Image: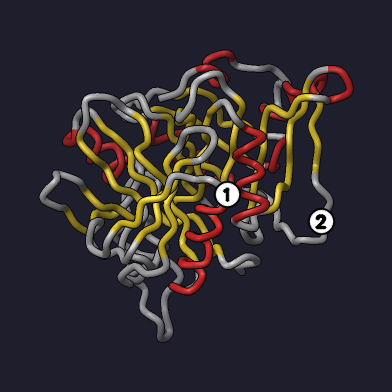
Amino acid sequence: MAMTGVLRPGHVQIRVLDMEASLTHYIERMGLLETDRDDQGRVYLKGWDEHDWFSVVLRPADTPGMDFTAFKVDSVETLNRLEQSLKDFGCEITRLPAGDLKHCGERVSFISPMGHTFELFAQKDYIGNGLGNINPHPWREDLKGMKVHRFDHCLLYGDDLDGAVKLFTEVLGFQQTEKVVVGPGGSVQIASFLTCGMKAHDLALIRHEEKGKLHHVSFLLRSWEEVLHAADIMGRYKIPIDIGPTRHGITRGRTIYFFDPSGNRNETFCDSYDWYPDHPEITWTEDELGGAIFYHDQQLNERFLSVVT
């Protein structure tokens, strides 16, 4: 349910060092489905329950991290309107032609105050979830590994958090569902959780001294049992675990974090809450930061806070 013209997270392009190892990780272990490749060596993937042609693009590179992440909007008219609003805000804009990413229409690319490249697009080819639209079964028989349902969100690190929050709330119409504040009287905001629809968050942002850093790319599962099954897959194939399985206080999500072969952090999670525009914003304070991040043991994990790509 879109509240703003921005529908949902649409795709993310991740830099990987070893494509063969990355495909084993994302397809065989996580359960994403390959949908195409292009002449740049990029591989297109999707979660099994996604309907657009792709949501994850892997690009071979010499350094890990994220090239960009994108949000789908409800129409070309909205795309054009938001492009002008982004220009008025002062963003650096690039209009990318249809087909620059296979199966995707025109994209409006812009750089946020935190240094990340974001995109908006209105059109992408339909591929479906393999169940059909008439009398469908509720699940597929051919899924592998963790069987992730969809690409859900990114958590990003950068310096100008205040500017980024202003951009997403005032220009793109997101709402801030939760925030973390520190300092005397909670004078400094260090984290923002933003939604464009009915989820607890579609994007998370953390204040950090360096611009343009990726903390994690997150994938949705539907139950605690599925999260524990994902942990079993990690144990069986010796996938490096960062933290979990555990629970966040922030967003209530039940989660496990781990690393792909290039060192990019992934998350599988379930069980957040529904958000409506009349809900109050939630604030987490410095004295409860341990439980905000890791509700079970109430302890901060330095690697979780500091390792980014």
Q: Which mark is residue 89?
A: 1
Image side of residue 148 versus residue 237, left or right: right
Q: Which mark is residue 279?
A: 2
Q: Total marks drawn?
A: 2
The single residue placed furthest to the top in the displayed view is: 302
Q: CA distance from mark 1 to mark 2?
A: 27 Å
Image side of residue 174 versus residue 139, left or right: right
Q: Please report the residue visible at 50 percent of the width from the left and 50 percent of the height from the top.
A: 152
Q: Looking at the picture, how far across and down is residue 145, in whole percent?
A: 34, 45
Of marks 1 and 2, which one's residue comes earlier in the chain?
1
Specify whether residue 235 is in view.
no
Q: Please report the residue visible at 34 percent of the width from the left and 38 percent of the height from the top.
A: 67
Which quarter of the figure is the N terminus placed in? bottom right
Q: Please report the residue visible at 61 percent of the width from the left and 49 percent of the height from the top.
A: 168
Residue 184 higher or lower than 174, as above or below: above
Image side of residue 180 versus residue 263, left or right: right
Q: Looking at the picture, how far across and down is residue 250, in whole percent?
A: 71, 37
